[in-house]
Image (spheres, rainbow, N blue to C red):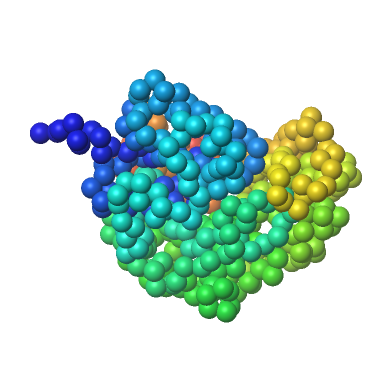
Amino acid sequence: MKTKDDHKRKVSVITLGCSKNLVDSENIITQLRFNDWNAEHEPDEPAPVVIINTCGFIQSAKEESIDTIIRYAKAKSAGLVEKLFVTGCLSQRYRDELAKEIPEVDAWFGTLELPELLHRFRADYRHELIGERQITTPKHYAYLKIAEGCSRTCAFCAIPLMRGSHRSRSIESLVEEARHLASIGVKELILISQELTYYGVDRYGKRRLPDLIDQLTEVEGIEWIRLHYTYPGRFPLELLDTMARHEKVCNYLDIPLQHISDAVLKTMQRRHTADDIRRVLDAARARVPHIAIRTTFLVGFPGETEADFLQLLSFVREQEFERVGVFTYSHEEGTAAFRLTDDVPAGVKADRANRLMEVQRTISERKNEAMAGRVFKVLIDRKEGDFFVGRTEYDSPEVDNEVWIPAHHYLRIGDFANIRITDYTEYDLYGEPVAN
């Protein structure tokens, strides 16, 4: 029989921001559950206790985090929530100011203060649970955060202010966690950190991402390994050979480039040139057959001229990336760029983002057209209405293209299926199963 005390031990964890934040929330939930709290991720009805894991990366993310905190603060004032705690990047950066403005929050915690957060629940932090976290993604894929923080000095980025310098986890701990994830049904590991390609330098004195991948491919049950957030400067080209050597490693590389104008790259403090970027891209396409390259660009950075932007547009047309995302520059206090004049008007930033994405829309549609009639291995993520929805190895969850398959076919969520592409749009594919 459920008791009143059972209700009081319910906790809702709300996650805002990126996949790295999601992993942090999963660790919070795991720690609480092993300390006899009934913690759930974003349930339909809020629990008596709510933890909000915030994002503070850019202005729009900060606004979303603040709006969410205020919404739950009002719920607390209305008696719908008893305790409200806030953690994550926004709390790390602005806790003193926010505490004055939103007194309904019971306590604020930074990105490295999980033990202190747990202490408010009279719970002990158990280090051995890091490899046994409860995932909140569909059970067939999970994010594996291989490092925390960032040691880069990119002028536009506040991540080092919120997350500290780069800190690699040990290969042994990551392989152990991968085995646990495989044991609970995970088939796809998505490797994440602020910069994958720096992995190992702080702990081992050299870049060890290829070595880590070699060991992860040996984990039974893992069929896909996907790489997110590499860095073009001093890119370890041996990583490309590792990708090509292992069938389990998806032919997919996320490499945020930000810009191609040397003038803008210099002001951004990216520490590499347009020629460096082109060398990495040429090597990736030469060494990894059929690779899909995902990148992101930042437009409207201080000092970006129309000529700089046209150079970027030309570069996107030239390279024909498989996947592209675009951000407009956000003037963030505490960053090196904050000392610069934010001189590109908001309307110009938005116009440049739209123009770039229109170029990419045409490229994406042409690439999807080329996939029509071909058969691809697809991982089925969910059922939505009259369709099963899945992804090829060239697509990451939530940010890339999806494959839609009529639901009258017998498919199971979490299984792989061979799908022949029958139709396409700019950002989606449609298909039918074929016999194995």
Is residue 314 visible in the rendered image? The answer is: no
The quadrant in which residue 366 appears is top right
- Residue most extreme to the top: 78
Tally of numbered tags = 0
Is residue 298 visible in the rendered image? The answer is: yes
Figure check: 393 above or below 405: below
Task: Residue at 44%, 51% (x, y): give it.
Answer: 24
Q: Nearer the viewer, residue 88 or 245?
A: 88
Figure check: 358 above or below 190: above
Q: Is residue 148 left or right of residue 271?
A: left
Q: Nearer the viewer, residue 79 or 323?
A: 79
Figure check: 256 above or below 400: below
- Residue most extreme to the bottom: 205
Q: Is residue 3 left or right of residue 417?
A: left
Q: Nearer the viewer, residue 388 or 350?
A: 350
Q: Is residue 244 left or right of residue 158?
A: left
**What is the x, y in percent for residue 171?**
44, 72
The N terminus lies in quadrant: top left
**What is the x, y in percent for residue 410?**
30, 38
Task: Residue at 57%, 79% (x, y): give it.
Answer: 205
Task: Residue at 25%, 39% (x, y): give it.
Answer: 9
Task: Residue at 26%, 44% (x, y): give it.
Answer: 37
The quadrant in which residue 174 appears is bottom left
**What is the x, y in percent for residue 59?**
65, 37
The quadrant in which residue 330 appears is top right
**What is the x, y in percent for residue 13?**
39, 40
